[in-house]
Image: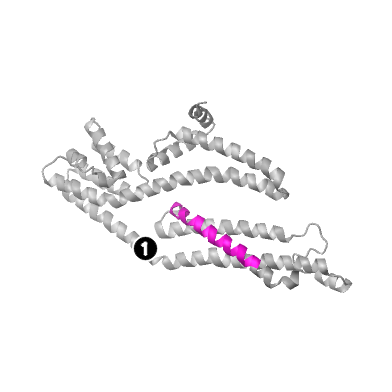
Amino acid sequence: MNFNKLYLKISMLAPKSMVNSISTLMEQGGFTISPRIFIGFTLYLTFFATLASVFITQIIVQSQTLRFLIPAVVLISIPGLLYMLIMMTADNRARKIEELLPDALDIIAANIRAGMTLENAIWLAARPEFGPLRDEIKKISADTFGGKPIEENLEKMAGRVRSDVIKRAVQLIQEGIRLGGEMSKLLEEVAEDTRNTQTLKKQISTSTVTYTLFIIFAATIMAPLLFSISTTYSKISQNLMVTANTGNTGTLLQNIPFGGGGNSNAINPNDIFYFALESIIATNLLAGFIIGQIRYGKATRGVGYVPVLLIISVTIFLVTQQTLQLLVQGFIK
C-alpha cells in the first residue's frame, strides 16, 4: 500500500490556510518532505491514536473524567507536538544562519573589494562551514544566474528563514542595491550591526537569569510542594471522617474540608490528586514558554525546557506526597 498517496488524500481535509502555514514552517525548517504528506500523516496518526486511547481507557480506566480527558489530551497533543517540532526546527535553523551571517557578509564584502561583481561575490561565499546558510547562498546564486533579479532572490531567502534579523539585513542590502551605494562598505556595516544585535541578545539573556531561576523555582519546586501538602491533607480529612465513631465527633468532622460528611458529591482525594497533577503540567508548560520569551524573545524557544521541568516537578510532587503520607501515617490509618 502506498501510504504517501493515502496521506495526500487525507490532507485534503485540512483547510488551505493550515496547509500554507505548515508549508512555510517546513520550508523555513529545511524539511524536504511534502507538507501535504506531513499533514496527512499527522491527521492519520492522531485519528488512530485517539481511537486507540478511547478503547483502552474504556477497558482500563474506571473514572469517567479520565475516560474523556485522556483521549482529548491525545487528540490535542499529537498535532501540537508535531507542530512544535517543525517550529523548533525552523527556529534552530534560523539561529544558526543568524550566527553565520556576519562572517558570510564579510567574505562577500572582501570579494567585492577584490573586483568581483555582487553576484560572483555571493556565489564564492557559499562555503561548506556555513551549513544551512551555504544552502541559502547557493539558491540565491542559482536563481540570480538563472536570470531573476537579485533583490527578488534575497527577498525569497528572507522568507525561507524564520528570523527578523535576517529580514532586516536583507532589507538593508536591497536598499543599497537599489540606491547604488558602495556595497562592500554596506555589507560590512550590516555584518557589524548583526553582531551588535547578537551581543545585545546575549546581554539581555544574561540579565534575565534571575527571573528565569525564579520561574523555575516556583514551577518545579514550590508548586509541587504545595500541591503535595494539599493532597495529603485531603486524604487525612477523608480518613478522619471514616474513623469517626462518636456522634459529636462525626458532626464536628462533617465540617472538615474534603471530608464530605457522607455527601456523594463531595470532592475526594483522587480528584485533588488529578487536579494537582494537571495543574503542575500546565504550570511547567507555561513556565517553559515564559522562559523562552524572556531569554530569547520567542516563546517556542522555551519548549526544550518543558520536558526537564515536567520530570523534575512531577518527581518532587510524587516523592513529597509519599513522604508526607509516611510522616502522618498514624493519622490516616
Q: Which image quadrant is residue 54 in?
A: top right
Q: Position of residue 264 (x, y in %)?
A: 81, 57
What colour scheme governs how the chains and residues are painted in the rendered image of this protein?
Answer: one colour
Kind of residue at badge 1: Ile
Which quarter of the rendering shows the C terminus? Answer: bottom right
Q: Circle 1: is it few (<14), some (14-19), or many (20+) Cα within 10 Å? A: some
Residue nearest the viewer, comparing 231 with 165? 231
Circle count: 1
Tell me: 118 left or right of 233: left
> Measured along the vertical axis of the image, is residue 231 above or below residue 145?
below
Residue at image x 12%, y 47%? 113
- Segment tinted magenta in the rendering: 300-322
Tell me if 223 is positioned left or right of 17 in this view.
Answer: right
Secondary structure predominantly adopted by residues drawn in magenta? helix
Residue 171 visible to the viewer: no
Q: Is residue 126 magenta?
A: no
In the image, is residue 308 part of the stretch drawn in magenta?
Answer: yes
User: What residue sits 50% from the left and 64% below the top?
Assistant: 216
Residue 173 or residue 93, whichever sits in front: 93
Circle 1: element type: helix
Q: Is residue 196 visible?
A: yes
x and y percent of residue 160 in the render? 35, 41
Question: Which residue is drawn at the image coordinates 35% and 51% (left, top)?
Answer: 95
In the orientation shown, which residue stands out farthest toward the left?
A: 115
Instruction: Give the quarter of the image for residue 203.
Output: bottom left
Q: Which residue is mark 1?
A: 204
**Residue 279's spot in the image, x, y percent?**
61, 58
Above/below status of 284 relative to 225:
above
